[in-house]
Amino acid sequence: MNFQTPRALALCAMTALVAACSQPDMAVPQAVLPDAPEPTTFTRAYSMTENVDGTIRVFAQEDGDHTYLYEMRRSGQVWSEPAKLDFPTKISLTTPSFSFHDGMLYYASDVDLPGREGRKDLNLWRVALADGVWGTPEYLPLDIINTGANESSPAMTADGTLFFSTNHARAGGGGYDIMSARENAPGEWDVQTMPSFVNDFRVDSHLAVTPDGARLFFYSHRQPSLGSVDIWMIEADGAGSWQQPRNLGAPVNSDQIDFGAGLSGDAKTFFFSRNGRLMEVSMDAALAQVNQAPQGSTDNPSP
């Protein structure tokens, strides 16, 4: 048998305490990059996403009129400093999200598409990551997913259901509305609108979805809210549709600007942006107060 002396036990206890103290309290939101400069309205970061291996994180960050994607890579327990990704763009690369289905990074870019040169709209792209090396980005099909309006905020479940935000009238006629799509064969997508109570008349965007598709997160200006912008959630109803949208409440939402949801690769950590600073909190904590949060009407008032 392995007996320990009182001194050894005390040392073990002290070591455990130090280790515990060195870990962030994931029950309350923590800054992902605590040493980063304080964000301004021109340098906001948001939409952090992590691959299923938990080794690469990508997020969007504004730089004046431009928005870029940055990646961080993990070595052991240490994350690298953010490095800018060089994907096709004019001035905007935004709303990245690793797919739980194919492992690819989905995102939006304003780069010209064939036959649509000179336009300024955002379109959905995806790029594979193999052995730590990025492949060649490809755009999703024209006139099926990418329409000439703005398409952004992709989020894909493990079974291949893609959710995205668009200001195309086919989504419901609001500002930016959520749609869903499934790729039934290479290049062949079935695109669906969401139930009328999901979208409101302004902006429903910056999407994140759990691997099983049971929960979809988005930001919205709808009321009542804790701040000017809050993160909301809809849950699958088990019968092929959705329950009513619910405000996440504290600790995710506050009297500040909370938006830009994202998930870790194991879906146990919830990322979001508060006033442009990347934050993280456990998924359990993110969902803990949803039933106590202010919940609004599902009616769509006129603009």
Image: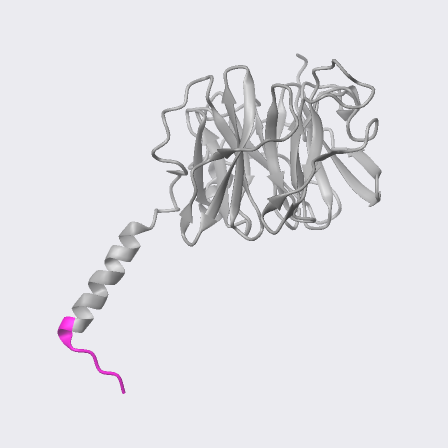
Residue 280 location, x and y as percent? 44, 40
Q: Nearer the viewer, residue 39 or 245?
A: 39
Question: What span is in magenta?
Answer: 1-7
Total labels: the figure holds: 0
Kindly identify the residue that appears in the image at 66 percent across and 19 percent down. 201
Residue 24 painted magenta: no
Can residue 287 be seen here? no
Decide if residue 206 is on the left or right side of residue 276. Answer: right
Kindly identify the residue that appears in the image at 30 percent across and 55 percent down. 20
Kindly identify the residue that appears in the image at 80 percent across and 42 percent down. 183
Q: Image quarter for residue 35?
A: top left
Q: Nearer the viewer, residue 59 or 183?
A: 59
- The overriding secondary structure of the stretch rendered in magenta is loop
Residue 226 location, x and y as percent? 46, 26
Residue 3 painted magenta: yes
Kindly identify the residue that appears in the image at 43 percent across and 42 percent down. 80
Decide if residue 297 is on the left or right side of residue 149. Answer: left
Q: Is residue 206 above or below residue 121?
A: below
Quarter the C terminus occupies: top right
Residue 154 location, x and y as percent? 66, 35
